[in-house]
Image (cartoon, helix red, strand yellow):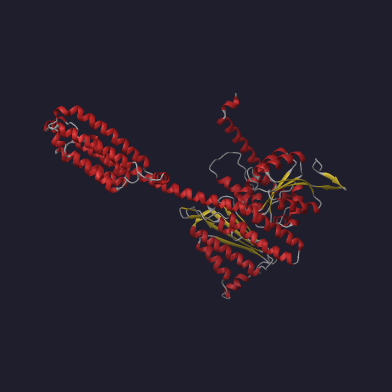
Amino acid sequence: MGGSGVQEGGGKMTVSVMVVDDHPMWREGVARDLAERGFEIVATAGDAASAVRIAKAVRPNVVLMDLNLGELSGVDATLMITGELPETRVLVLSASGEHDDVLQAVKAGASGYLVKSASADELVEAVSRTAAGDAVFTAGLAGLVLGEYRRMAAAPDDSKDKPELTERETEVLRLVAKGLTARQIANRLVISHRTVENHVQSTLRKLQLHNRVELARYAIEHGLDSEPEAER
Amino acid sequence: MPKLPAERVTKVIDDPATPLWRGVIALRIVTFLFAAANVIANQSGYIRPWLAWTTLGVMALWSVFTSRAYSTTWGRRWPLVLVDLAFTCGLMLLSPLIMSDHQLLMLNVPLITTIWACVPAVALGALGGSFAGFAGGLTVGLFTYLSKGLPGLDLLRDVVLLAGAGMVVGMASATARRSAVLLAQAQRTEAATAERERLARSIHDSVLQVLARVRKRGLEVGGEAAELAMLAGEQEVALRNLVAAAPDSTVDGEIDLRPGLQLLATPRIQVSTPATQVMLTAGTAVELHSLVREALSNVDKHAGEDARAWVLLEDLGEEIVLSVRDDGPGIPEGRIASAAREGRMGIEKSIKGRVESLGGTLELQTGPGEGTEWEVRVFRKGAAR
């Protein structure tokens, strides 16, 4: 197992992948599917704590993350992995329609989301695109992200750093949520395919940045409030 | 009392006014001490000191008895509290026999029962609410007047204090009972939710994983396995939606529109919603839900078996936006209008009619090869238009 991320393999870049899922049958199945399609499976993990530990050691290009992992959730693991390893991308693979969980994972730094019922081809494409730095947006995720921006806009606190969508980003997200492909969106809005991708990625980045700032602020406030002796 | 500990515990918890009853008992003991001090201070002037001491002894016994009774739910009942009221008032009426006229009318010496007499009024409040407490206070006040036989400002003050105290305790007791009911409801809901989550987790960990795997491998193997895979896939989506859909939560007649919509999802139909509740009046939610179902069945009928569909729910605060899009061949221009002319009012009537009755707007975007997209905008009731 190579420790470094992207490796040269016959002139073609090999994407190293780590599969995190608490269900052994699923974990092995996905790992085999991906290995058959030329991905390098560098590690698997069955719980969030070991996922974080192993990810730090093997530094994979892509982590396929299940959210339902027991005590420490996939959301926590996503936050830790993307915080520690800026080069590693996390793709959430979720079996149930846990809407809030998926949103939390994306806010924590996941760059995409795929339902487990997706076909092997869809999975392969999603992993490749994630490795290439694209955001893998399903219609469902677009609906969640749109809802989150609107929830924040409607929230009573009027902090200045609240992220907002531009008109174009809203337009793009709505079309993604209505099931249009990036190409169809590009055609309809008469913009390039790349621009569509950039808009989509930007909506995620703003959300993730805001989330990190909020978490840091929360930690500082509560660290000072609850443990004054720590200052001594 | 031969009661099982468990039964006792539940009984005491069952009565949310228990702290008030403890207050009643404390009041009874404190006021009895005051009454005893009153007898000691004024006995030299009494015309029948022996009756004063006897009455005080009866009051002591009655205090002990009612305190024991009021500390159980057995004793917190109308008959006992009313007997308490009658008994206390009866003792109060002994005052003219004990005290001299001079004490009673000139010196303004307290009656034999003194402020001990206020306890039944407070107990009535704790038992029956503010009206019962008020009435109890008035009754005690009335008997104070009957015992003294002379109206006056002091007497009026006592009556107001008694009735007021009874009423305030009554309100507190009613509030405690209401809160207890609400708390019990909340606890039941919480227990149901926890159980639901436990079920969801175990279904997720077992059945869903297997179904998803079967579907995936079956499709890859192909042939007959692919058919089985399709069946497994349909059940997987249905089960996933069933597990994910939160129970209908009703807040002031409003329900969350999301769970109903999420149940419409199939492998070919994607339903996208916000992660937070979208609360609407029940009537509006039901109408919108039927409308989406109508639009989706229209997809099945006209866009072909392989067409996929997407439902998007957006909450803009004052406005709800629902979009239903399919990737079918689209509705040729004039089809809807000609269908209306021919009297086949399917879409026209169901969708347009429903939207109009909700005071919303409907936009249809379609064309050959472009699929069909319905966008419904409905204003929230109460929101400014």
Q: Nearer the viewer, residue B54 or A157?
A: B54
Which percent across, then down, holds residue A150? 58, 48
Instruction: Give the residue at x 27% y 42%.
Output: B121
**What is the x, y in percent for residue B191?**
51, 49
Q: Residue at x 58, y 45 (%)?
A: A152
| Residue occupying the far bottom of the picture | B342
Give percent across and percent down for residue A163: 62, 43
Between residues A221 and A67, which one lies in front from this camera angle? A67
Determine whether, in the image, residue B174 is placed left or right of residue A132.
left
**Side of B268 relative to B95 (left or right):** right
Question: For this view, does A160 lie left or right of residue B159?
Answer: right
Camera-nearest residue between A197 and B164:
B164
Q: Quadrant of the C terminus of chain A?
A: top right
Write down the quadrant of residue B111 in the picture. Answer: top left
Question: Is residue B168 something one can see in this rendering?
Answer: no
**Quarter where residue B215 is shown:** bottom right
Q: Looking at the image, is B52 positioned above or below residue A76?
A: above
Residue at the far right in the pictured view: A10
Looking at the image, the residue that sits furthest to the front is B2
Answer whether residue B152 is visible to the viewer in this image. yes
Spot occupied by residue A171 in the image (x, y as percentages of width and height): 65, 52
Query: Seen in the image, is A218 located left or right of residue B52?
Result: right
| Residue lying furthest top | A232
Q: Is residue B195 above or below residue B297?
A: above
Marks counted in the figure total 0
Q: Quadrant of the N terminus of chain A?
A: top right
